[in-house]
Image: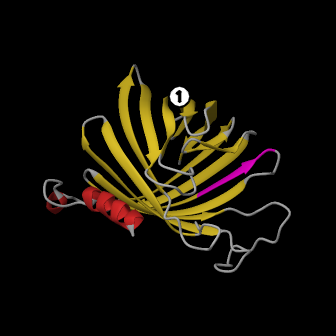
Amino acid sequence: MKKWLIVSSFFLFLLPGNGFGAENATAEDDFSIAGTLLVRSSHIWRGIPVSMDYCFEPELTVSKGNWAFTSWAARSFDGNYNEFDLILSWKIPFVELTLYDYYNPVRGETNRFLQWNGDQQRHSMEASAEISAIDHFSLFGATFLTGDNDETGRPFYSTYIEGRWEQTVHKINFQFFAGMTPFKGYYASEASWLNLGAKGEYAVSVGKKLKMPVEVAWHYNPAIRQHFLVWSLGLTGW
């Protein structure tokens, strides 16, 4: 019950309401498609080392108006890490709400994408909200809804909260971030800071419609006392 109160209070704070100008939101009717192909030196997710091998990460986003639908995948070069996600998001000024379906097959075991229950189902669902009402600063929060259980089968409702500060200097986008979990769950055995660090990204134009993003990021997870340096290189556009 305590976890639900914490999670509910946080998301109620992030939802659009008085002061966030929902009534002034305007929807662009343009339909667009964008794709990205990345090679990443390792995959660090919210301070957690998911794969320490090189990863290939393709992404495709279809958007219209305030809505966007994204399919994202990742595969490590050694084959030990595979993931396929479906992501639906809705965005208005200052607020973005997102629903994730994470599919994580297990190497060497039976995996069925359309299996949604039982011991061999590999899906988990998560909802998130991001607010960016202050210049250069945003606050992100996400909570697992399904596929995140303790040893007794009860859901953890694992929650991640992250503050982000961004600034562009000489066409390089810098971001500083600090992420934590407020209670025991998937991320840690207790309330902990998880993801402290910074990253820089620069996009090189390749023709009229393509860009080559180059990114370097440093992560520190105080809960496990580990540092990670990650770089990525790819192509984006359509």
Point 49% across, 34% down: residue: 196
Do we see residue 4 in this rendering? yes
Point 76% across, 39% down: residue: 53
- Asked if residue 107 is positioned above or below residue 34 in the image, the reply reads below
- Asked if residue 224 is positioned above or below residue 68 in the image, the reply reads above
Residue 13 among those drawn in magenta:
no
| Most common secondary structure along the magenta stretch | strand
Question: Farthest top residue?
Answer: 170
Looking at the image, which is closer to me, 206 or 126? 126
- The residue that label 1 is drawn on is 204
Residue 130, position as x, y percentages in the image: 35, 52
Residue 15, position as x, y percentages in the image: 27, 60
Read off the magenta span: 72-77
- Asked if residue 182 is positioned above or below residue 168 in the image, the reply reads below
Q: Residues within 10 Å of mark 1 (few under 14, many from 20)?
A: few
Residue 105, position as x, y percentages in the image: 73, 64
Looking at the image, which is closer to me, 153 or 24? 153
Point 43% across, 28% down: residue: 174
Looking at the image, which is closer to me, 49 or 137? 49
Quadrant occupied by the N terminus: bottom left
Is residue 94 toward the left or the right of residue 59 in the image?
Answer: left
Residue 219, position as x, y percentages in the image: 56, 32
Task: Count numbered badges in the picture.
Answer: 1
Is residue 215 toward the left or the right of residue 110 in the image?
Answer: left
- Asked if residue 166 is positioned above or below residue 9 in the image, the reply reads above
Point 38% across, 38% down: residue: 164
Looking at the image, which is closer to me, 140 or 155? 155
Question: Farthest right residue?
Answer: 108
Residue type highlighted by circle 1 = Val
The image quadrant that residue 118 belongs to is bottom right
